[in-house]
Amino acid sequence: MDNGLIQALLIGAIILLYTLQSLFSKMFNDAYPGDAKHSPDVFAVVSGAVVAVVSLFFSGFKFGPFRWETLLLGLINAAILYGYDQCIIKASGKGPYSIMMVFSLGGGIVIPALAALLPFYPFNKGVSVTQFVAIAIICVAVYLASAKDDGSEAVSGEKPNLRLFFILSALLALCNGLYGVMFVVQEGVTGVADKQLYVIYTFMGAAIISAVRLFATEKKKVLLPFKQNKKSFLYLMLAAVVSAMAVNVLVLLVGVVNETILYTFDNAGVMLLSALASAFIFKDKLSQKNVIGCIIMTLALVMMGASATIDGWLFG
């Protein structure tokens, strides 16, 4: 089978898996029987263990010699992953969801693209004019696709705090972008052989941070947040398994596919499918603005995928 086709299928698989993760995570949060503030930490602990097991399977239960560099990079990315989870939870209650998603998507695309311009960055590929234009169009489309007309974008009944909202959204963008960059840096520093071990360090590190936070807040009742009913347990395990599969497919593509294209399709594709799934599964009503945003995003993703051909037509 053609390598390009295989890569396209893997990118499609990543988009589908991360979309399913977001859906199962929402279902888990809705069904979670305990205090809602503990659900992200519970998910981080459980998913960290599941990711470790799945990554062991992907590696054939074999690893090379221990490298402290891999451990250090994994722990750094664990802190970034934890920061992302906390920022997206806190920002969602302070201001418009659509603006938050533009920040998150923008960071997930722009920061790796800018990092690729650095002369010492691994797998330096740069960004073409068509790709840059497509990224800008996608950011506008994300705003349109996620904007709500009923004023319900700030959740949890919290009082809007726009200054704090923009600070948290900026941190969210930074964390989302750095998370992708760190996967590229790891492969450039310690090599392909350490990919799965790096994933284990990242997710187990985030799990440990979450477990420590739970212990600090709950003390002797630290196990209480892990109590589940049948429905929440099912969604928790489905989200964790899908998350583990997604991240292990992702590491197969890092360093092989242009990171700008990879993270653009990943972030925008998940956003697009999630919007459609919310309409069909959760019966969320899509406004005319949302539909236009989804159409624009689809066209921009096609533009991104055909960027080499378009650049050839425009610039020869």
Image (spheres, rainbow, N blue to C red):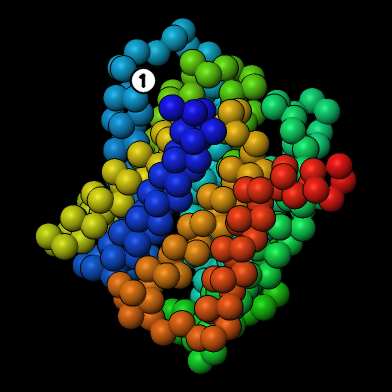
Going by the numbered disc 1, the residue's amino acid type is Ser
Residue at 41%, 84% (x, y): give it: 285
Mark 1: few/some/many CA within 10 Å (<14, 14-19, 20+): some
- Foreground pick, 245 / 253: 253
Seen at 66% across and 48% down, the residue is 306
Q: Kindly give the residue lying farthest to the right in the view shown.
A: 315
Name of the residue lying farthest toward the left: 230
Residue 121 pos. (x, y %): 75, 29
Res. 269 visible in picture: yes
Q: Using residue 157 as the reference point, say whether residue 146 is left or right of it.
A: right
What x and y, as percent, mark residue 155? Answer: 47, 79
Quarter of the image where the C terminus is located: top right
- For residue 1, above or below residue 38: above
Please tell me which residue is depicted at 50% across the width and 64% down the height of the picture. Answer: 272
Residue 94 spot, x, y in % from top left? 57, 76
At numbered mark 1, what does the secondary structure look like: helix, strand or loop? Answer: loop
**Quadrant in which residue 261 is drawn:** top right
Between 309 and 129, which is closer to the camera in this rendering? 309
Count of numbered badges drawn on the protein: 1
Name the residue beneath numbered marker 1: 59
Q: Quadrant of residue 308?
A: top right
Position of 166 relative to 301 (above/below)? below
30 horizontally vs 133: left or right: left
The front one of 240 and 314 is 314
Inspect this view and state whether residue 40 appears.
no
Of all residues, the one furthest to the bottom in this rendering is: 150
- Residue visible at 51% across and 28% down? 3
Q: Residue 146 at x, y = what percent?
A: 54, 74
Nearer-the-camera pick, 261 or 63: 261
Quadrant (top left/top right/bottom left/bottom right) for the N terminus: top left
Q: Is residue 308 left or right of residue 175?
A: right
